[in-house]
Amino acid sequence: MRQKAIRRPWSGTWTKFLYKDLKSNGGAYLLAIPVVAYFILFSYKPMLGAIIAFKDYSRAFGIWGSPWADNYGFEHFLDFFHSVYFGRTLRNTLTISLANIAFGFPLPIILALLINEVHNKKYKRLVQTVSYMPYFISTVVVCSMITLFTSEKAFISQIVGWFGIEVTGNLLNYESAFLPIYTLSTIWQTTGWNSIIYLAALSAVDPELYEAARIDGANRWRQTLHVTLPGISTTIILLLILAVGNMMNVGYEKVILLYNDLNRNVADVISSYVYRRGIEQADFSFGTAVGLFNSIINFVLVAMANRVCRKFTGAGLW
């Protein structure tokens, strides 16, 4: 006996199926058009330009007409690896990134936990507003403030002087001071803004869990350890993976505005070197090659961090 054929949703002509689907979900497709267009124009289309990393790009010949670089197209990568700046910029990039993660990553979590404990709504809004404000100050203004506050007679240099350290000239001229200044200013500028996502995660924690913990005799500290932190652990892990995946992306804007000939040995990072070589010297192939190298390393770091977190916590990006 022949089995009756199963009718599939797309049975019939594709035209009819497409018409019914557009009729049912046309509004959703219409809303998705700007998002899809954005990613096509600004995310996927620029990927084609990565080919100039393997070419001796010339604006006269264009991307496709430019000749391929030597060493099977890897000449610019080898140029970067053999450069005297490679070791220095790589070391400085990783040092600054690790410092930002080690000292800057936990602080938004702590701030969110503290704000979550505030019950006075007016005071809570005031604290949130004050902590968010530095994020909206432009990098140029922030760097100007840092340069002024670290000058010889400014209050930061005077505070350092209280510990018996004599400061002559600007504090930024000292190699040992650049990393703390850069890290602390970044923490001040981003901690409040980064705490927003943790506050959103805290609002999703079930209040009944706190009630059960109080019935069991848990104080506020115990509730934080056994209810609050486990409730936002997935968010913490995901953001940590993303932070590790951006270790090679230290923005050149702030570095260029703060470094000078005296602190360049500890301040120069990959992005600032690429800016000097790729933009100022118009070596676009070299800049693209280094950018592609950074992207590959970041992808490897994300994959490794995701695998470690998945193994030990069960949570990850995929």
Image (tube, grey):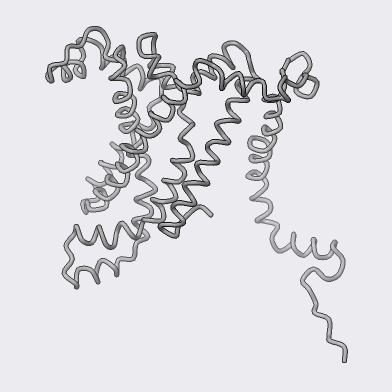
Q: Quadrant of the C terminus?
A: bottom right
- Depth check: 44 or 72 in front? 72
Percent coordinates x, y for residue 29 in the rendering: 68, 53
Percent coordinates x, y for residue 176 in the rendering: 29, 19
- Depth check: 303 or 42 in front? 303
Percent coordinates x, y for residue 67 in the rendering: 78, 19
The picture quadrant where one finds residue 280 is: top right
At 26% across and 16% down in the image, what residue appears?
A: 150
Across the whole image, how many numbered discs are drawn on residues?
0
At 21% across and 51% down in the image, what residue appears?
A: 120
At 87% across and 66% down in the image, what residue appears?
A: 13
Q: Is residue 314 above or below residue 243?
A: below
Q: Quadrant of the N terminus?
A: bottom right
Relative to residue 91, is residue 39 drawn left or right?
right
Q: Is residue 25 above or below residue 53?
A: below
The picture quadrant where one finds residue 140 is: top left
Percent coordinates x, y for residue 70 in the rendering: 72, 19
- Depth check: 39 or 81 in front? 81
The picture quadrant where one finds residue 182 is: top left
Relative to residue 174, is residue 71 drawn left or right?
right
